[in-house]
Every structure is written in structure tokens, then in C-alpha cells.
Amino acid sequence: MISESHLRPTRLIQQDGAIKFCLSAGHFASRELETESIIIPMRNYHGQRWYTLCISSQVGCRMGCTFCQTGRMGLLANLSADQIVIQFTTAQEILRRQADRSEAAEPGLRNVVFMGMGEPLDNFNAVVAAIRILNDPAGLNVPLSRITISTVGRVDGIRKLAELRWTSLRLAISLTAADDALRNELMPVNRAMPLAELKEALLDYPRTRRTRFFIEYVLLKDVNDSEHHADALAAWCESLPVRVNVIAYNPQQPAAYQTPDDQTIVAFILHLRQKGILAKRRVTIGRDVFGACGQLGNTEFHRKELLASGGAAASAAQ
């Protein structure tokens, strides 16, 4: 049973409808850790409104993607299934209280995306257990079709996930580069699990006629934003049912790259479409509260620095 104290965020920041909240998540090197989650307001062309919850599966991450704040932290903790689910129930409570204050009908949570801190497939068992709890018709009753797992391309995890035959579950791949040399630099996981292996795992993944993989592509100025890079991406996507979400780089603290201008972003998307690829620009929400894609992660927490400061014994005891 979830106690009232578990539903009490340690921090809560709201900006332009986006709500970032943090929950206590144990300790590392005598420092109290936090999960970070984002409630994102959504609206379609018909004016319908709902909320999406961006949920964390780890505190920090060991994948080391160079454009991601979380990757700079290193892995500090794997979250339990309970700690993952509590993020959802806390978000429900935050929205309920917000509706009570406004005395107006507010839409509820519709989608859950594992796109917060951590690599979900690096904490496979806890994430799968959390999804089962979220999906349970006798419990939270979130359809699998409204749950998305985003991975950097853990081929082993994708193949384990395929064994569950959850064809309704949505799968997103953070790609960001479609040639191995560049992706090796930006996303170290590619050195062990290169693009060809990743594509083969997706081709083998169980799916229905309606299945589309979401390909997440973070545009970095003068790094991966040229027509040549768009050609490589289109070629890699060939024979896969995909939708490419183009995401303008959201600066870290301090920023490692620059964000392309709007003209470059639009040209990149149009070039993909000319190649027959369904491509859309993902609108950035939550940048001002450091809740946008690639920005989650407390800048005070870095695994190497915490261990160097005398936390090695504490870490070993966990």
C-alpha cells in the first residue's frame, strides 16, 4: 500500500503547464537521491487535451550519451517496480489536487513514456514488473498501447522484450546518428551493439500491421543535421515501420552542443519526407524547468565525484 508520505514530492516546479516533480529514492554515498518525472500537457488539432507522464526507471544512467544530462551522472541507482509505479500515482494525485484548486474539469493521465532518467532496458525486470502493475485491469488499468519504452538501442533488452509478445506496447529508439562512426562518438552503446544489430532486432520484433517504431533523433548543430545525415537516416529506416521524431537539442548544464536554427530543422524534416519517411518535429515542453528531452538529472550528482569524495564504502554496502 502506498502511504501519503510516498506521494509527497521533495520538489515540484511548474512552468507553462509542464510539471516537474521529484521523489525520494534512497541514498548513494550518503547523499539522498531523487527520481525526476515530468507531467506534460498535450493537445491535438481538435482541441482535445490530456497529460503524458514522462517516468524514470533509474537515478542516473550508465549509457553515457554525450547529449544527455542524465548520462553525465553515471548510474546511481536502479529503481524498484514500486518506485516506478509511485511516480504514476503521485502524478495522478498532483493533477487531482490541481483540479480541486481550479474547480474545473481537468483531463487525466493518458500516456506513460519511459523517457525520464535511465535506460529502461538496463533495469529490465523492474520495468516489466512496473508495466504489469500499471496495465493490470484490476488496478491502474493503463493500456499497453498507451505505454512507451524508449531505449538507446539495448539489443539484448529488445530481444528479451520481444519474448513477452506485447505487440501493443510502443517502442521508441533513441538513434541520433545513422552511421556507426558518428553514433560511436555520441552514444557509446553503439560500440557494443552497432546499427546493423539494432536494425535486425527491430526487424525480428513481433508486431501487428499497425505497429510503428518511434525513432528519436536529436538534432545537434553541425554534428548530425545535414542533408547527408538525413539520407543516412532514411536509408537505415528503410524496410522498418517507423515514425521519426526530430528533437532540437535541449541544452545541458553546461551545454555540450548547440541547437540548430529553425530553418535547418525544417529542412531536415522535409528531406526525410521527400525520402518517404514519416517525420515530425517534436515540440519541446518543459525546457525552462529542465524537464525536456535530455535535460533530466541533478547537476550535483555525478557518480565518479561522489565516490571520490569518500562514498565508495557506502556504495559497496548497497
Image (cartoon, helix red, strand yellow):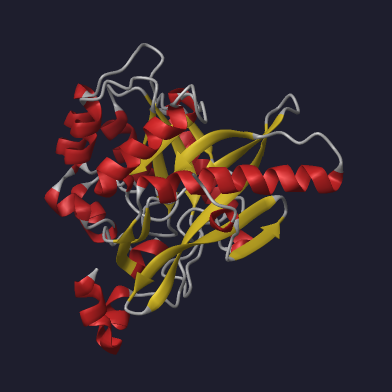
Considering every residue shown, the one lying at the far bottom of the view is 309
Establish if 51 lies above or below 98.
above
Give the x, y percent position of residue 114.
42, 43
Comparing 244 with 55, the one in front is: 55
- In the visual, does 3 lie left or right of 19? left
- At x 34% / y 33%, what residue is drawn? 234
Image quadrant in which you'd find residue 289: bottom right
Considering every residue shown, the one lying at the far top of the view is 209
Give the x, y percent position of residue 66.
33, 63
Comparing 266 with 13, the one in front is: 13
- In the visual, does 42 lie left or right of 175? right
**Residue 231 seen:** no
Image quadrant in which you'd find residue 243: top left
| Image quadrant containing the C terminus | bottom left
Considering every residue shown, the one lying at the far right of the view is 103
- At x 50% / y 58%, what residue is drawn? 36
- At x 30% / y 88%, what residue is drawn? 309
Image quadrant in which you'd find residue 132: top left
**Residue 145 seen:** yes
- At x 71% / y 27%, what residue is drawn? 45
Number of callouts in the render? 0
Give the x, y percent position of residue 158.
23, 35
